[in-house]
Amino acid sequence: MTTQTRGGDGGTSGTGVRETVTAAVRGLALALITLPGAILCLVLSVVSIALVPIGVGIVTTPWVLSGVRLFADWRRVLAAEWAGVRIPSAYRPLPKGANPWARTFGMLRDPATWRDLRWLPVDMTAGFVTALLPAVLLFYPLEGLALAAGLWRVFPDGYWYAFIPVTGQASALGAGALAVVFLLLFRLLPVPFLRAHFRLTRAVLTSGQGELAERVRVLTETRRDAVDTSAAELRRIERDLHDGAQARLVAMGMDLGTIEALLDKDPARARQLLAQARQSSVDALAELRDLVRGIHPPVLAERGLGDAVRALALRMPVPTEVEVELPGRAEAPVESAAYFAVSEALTNAVKHSGADRIWIDLHHVNDGDGGDGGAGMLRISVTDNGRGGAAIGTGSGLAGVERRLGTFDGVLAVSSPSGGPTMVTMEIPCELS
């Protein structure tokens, strides 16, 4: 197992050539997926909803709208990873075991569903353009330079480069000069264009009117879940103490009483019981330490989240790489929630994914870096190269992680296509001390 720490000097500010080219390539890939994906989702959604009155849509609509949600959630993950733009997901939960009728109308009554459907036309038009512009600024100047180098001779009837009609070498040199201007713009604009694409996505997908009511509803649910979780945790601690350390201490007390009675009559038996009592005290102390570590690991309290996650990675049976960029420490409850969320994600990866390698990335984005407004953001991603297929609410423990993060207004996103890889991304609003 290896752990690596990334320092703060190489932060992704988006000003270097590498970041600019990366933004252009990402924008091109995004544009190639955005247009067909948005058209397919919109057409299937409209057809499926139109077929609801004759009954066919009752069966197909939940599947189609679930696909639209996956498409939107995938964009939310990319927005956080590529541009530092946080787009909250606020879908209303559906009852477990609901029939197709209840699922269909439960989704159609959800305002987030109609925000998704309004977003699809925007994504295939303005979203497509803003995603494609970075790549255009990369490739279009090459065309102008090629015209200046003599390519204009291939077009005997003339050729338009932007607003310049290229009919001879002089005008071709003018096209080359304009291409140089485009190259200068390419040095400055691809990263802002890509961020503008995701901010446009956030503007449409984020709830407007009624946002406060929805936020209150979500926070009420997460607070209730937090109370239930705390009560369950107290019951677990009480049970572990009663069945473990307490039972050993009671048995040790009985052994000491027997030893006291046997000291004069049977010293050999007394010495044997004394050794047994000593071992019981060692076992009880080990159980108490394990219990304390499960409540709040000492390394987390003493050295912070980064070192605690590194220590967690060293105990993994799968090679795990850790990259940390945390210039300070978050509040203790936030660190605890993040630690146990990472622990659960790692447990899922080891138990269910069949992965042979895991990567963990922890970093904090402040107001200036995130471009997202509000307080800073703790971002954690756990990636494995396993078989994929992970989802929230399928018995994987991710639903509990989502509830734990929701207590701090955090979000959880899972990208896990069949065949892998799986990326679990967690975000918690917080400031570092």
Image (cartoon, rainbow, N blue to C red):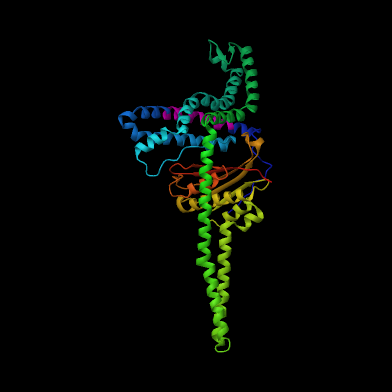
Q: Position of residue 175 (x, y in %)?
A: 62, 16
Q: Position of residue 252 (x, y in %)?
A: 55, 75
- 190 or 74, which is in the foreground? 74
The structure residue drawn at horizontal position 54% and vertical position 68%, both measured from the top left corner, is 245
Q: Position of residue 427 (x, y in %)?
A: 57, 42
> Would residue 401 be seen by someone viewing this image from the given angle?
no
Q: Is residue 309 left or right of residue 42?
A: right
Q: Position of residue 261 (x, y in %)?
A: 56, 85
The correct choice, above or below, for 419 with respect to 186 in the image is: below
Please, which residue is most extreme toward the left here? 54
Q: Is residue 396 magenta?
A: no
- 232 or 379, which is in the foreground? 232
Main secondary structure found in the magenta portion: helix
The correct choice, above or below, for 144 with respect to 300 in the image is: above
Residue 14 sits in which quadrant?
top right
Magenta extent? 23-41
Quarter of the N terminus within the rendering = bottom right
Residue 11 sits in which quadrant?
top right
Q: Is residue 36 magenta?
A: yes
